[in-house]
Amino acid sequence: WVKRIGEEIYAAFDVLENKYQGAIQYHEGDAGIALFERPELAVMGAAAVKEAIDNLEPETLNGEGQLKLKIRQGLATGSVFTAVVGDSYRKIPVIDGKALDSSYQMESDADPDGYVHVDDQTRFLTDHLFKYENGELIEKPTFDIKTSRDTKELPIQDIEKQISFLERKKETLLAYFPPFTRDEVQGKRTGKNETATILFTKMPTLEFLADVFSHDEDRLAEAYNAHFLVLRELIEMEHHGEIDKLYSGKVIARFRQKNHQEDAKKAALRLPKLLGKNEVIKGMLHWAGIEADVPVSGYTPGLVYIGPVGSNNRRAFTMLGGKVNLAARIMAAAKKHHHGILTDVARGNKYACEEELKGIGKVKLYTPPEESLTVMLKRKRLIGRDAERAHLASIISSYYKSEKTKLVNIISDAGFGKTELTKEFETQFKEQGGRIYRAGTAEQAKDIPGYLLQDFVKNTLGITTETTKEEIRTKLDTLPEETRKIIHHWLGLSLGYEKPAQTGKELEQARRQTLLDIIDDTPKLLVFNDVHWADENSLEVVEWLSQNLRNAIITTNYRPKEISRELAGTKIQLGAFGTDGIKQHIEYLIKKTPDKTALTFIEEQTQGNPLYIEEIVHFLQEEKLLQDGKLTRTPQEITQILEQTGEGLTTIEKLVLQRYRNLRDAEKQTILDYAACMFGEEFPKHLLEKALG
């Protein structure tokens, strides 16, 4: 019965895509989400779905008589974020955004006997077309909107190539489904009613980051990807579950192996610790300067239909049944009981709760045995550099016109903003629809030959320190045999593959060709960070890529005094700020205009280094030596204070140690325990040794 009703309901949704150009995102339980580019199409589609549901025959249920199916529909217009995260083995579409949240509220307010409830923006845009009363569409549209959808057929010229293409396409599409469902997706096993445990989890870390990065699609996708990798490792790899949906900071998963209820419980309990330990998520929270609650979870066992539903035109793999909604309600109930802070080493989830067998609505609460501190440091914002930004924008513009590969080098001494400017360049390029590839090196790795290129290969294939050997093997198995051998040998893996036949110069050439093989042919930006620590061969390969890779911008950043030689290509050099730039930077920091004495003093102390300006201004304000843009002591007296306290800034290393000394004891201990980030991406060992005396 559940499957049949699911088939009928989801078949009714076909009209959204077939006639009104909607894009159905999710089918889940008794709900669905669809996106439209035009609000009038969404209203028309909602009215058509309502009519299709009304035309279904009443259902006869034991003890209930005949019941008509009803539908509540909410519609909101605004910004929505969609992306696909994960890797070639396992990926998932995600959706987020204020319009999505608003549409949920509209659905809650909707009349189940009405057509659709809309928000103010939708009503404003469509008021001339439809009749509304208190936000509810009160009259079925009497006209039709003609739409067209482009259709393209792939000509069959070579049947063997066509079959090969479809086989590869099938493998790509299967990556969108959890491993345990792939037999069902391919029809090797039919969908059925079975006992499973459904888990709903709300992740405030992801919700907060989605809000912070609402205007930065690249960072938001990175936040979703980081959370998905944690969830996949925990739910699908460790506890044999299946991630079903990831949207609006929430995840829905099911467990249907022998110990499904225990698997769900363990996953819910371990999730806070894993999120708290994840370096990418921690780094994003630190960068944003925010704290987040621990995840709130609800799970419940019961009978659920799991399998494909829909029509011949459009099918979805989903799960149906009251237990899906019950798990969501338990999650909402758990949320009301406690409030806490996500820590770096959370030891459990006091919000994981399950339905007690004695009655619905009761919850069990699990309390973590210990807590610890979180140290968060905000990074500076890049001020000024308007000319350099404009230059980079013109490079992107000319690239998209010519599609010729270009090498761009962003150069500056430490503290002048090359890293921040590179990130802004990435954002500009991403906004044009291009793909970003990244790699970097570090001072600790400068004696490791090929570290930069190994990092590039790992990032491109999605291999991290948390990737298991089995996952790496799965990734490598998707590559051509020769490419697989080269990469396996290059990364120093021991997974049983044969060694490449090439040696010496032939092997080096094969490695370079492999880089071309694993990079897409779409518009792309390759970013190589801190190449002043890279070896000579890696620098040569970067230049070689600029001559042999099609359709790309290649960007490096480095310190000119620390690199073995300058790289070919366009050079964008960030120099010291002049007097006007220093003044602008100080105004941004203190929200006041500095007087001439203060401006001259800070210029002499910092030599126009933006990072030093930030640090010296912070110190002067902390010591009340700078108030309302004026020095409270003479420049000579303040210089003496700086010398006595060791606050004079001469090197980045000294700056880092100064920041360390300014922390509270508990924060210092956290730094030492977890080697947390203080400046840049890592905390160098020699500085740690100095800090320990």
Image (cartoon, rainbow, N blue to C red):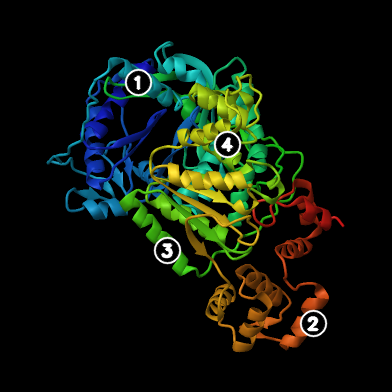
Badge nearest the viewer, 2 or 3? 3
Give percent across and percent down for residue 609: 62, 71
Give percent across and percent down for residue 489: 62, 28
Kindly identify the amino acid type of the residue bearing the numbered disc 1: Leu
- Of 569 and 253, nearer the camera is 569
* Tag of residue 391: 3
- The residues bearing labels 2 and 1 have C-alpha atoms spaced at a distance of 75 Å
Give percent across and percent down for residue 123: 26, 52
The first of marks 2 and 3 along the sequence is 3
Task: Confirm or deny contact between disc 2 and disc 3 (CB under 8 A).
Answer: no
Mark 4 burial class by Cα count in 10 Å: few <14, some 14-19, many 20+: some
Compared to residue 565, the image places residue 41 above or below, namely above
- Mark 2 sits on what residue? 640
Compared to residue 653, the image places residue 488 above or below, namely above
- Mark 4 sits on what residue? 458
* Tag of residue 125: none
- The residues bearing labels 4 and 3 have C-alpha atoms spaced at a distance of 31 Å
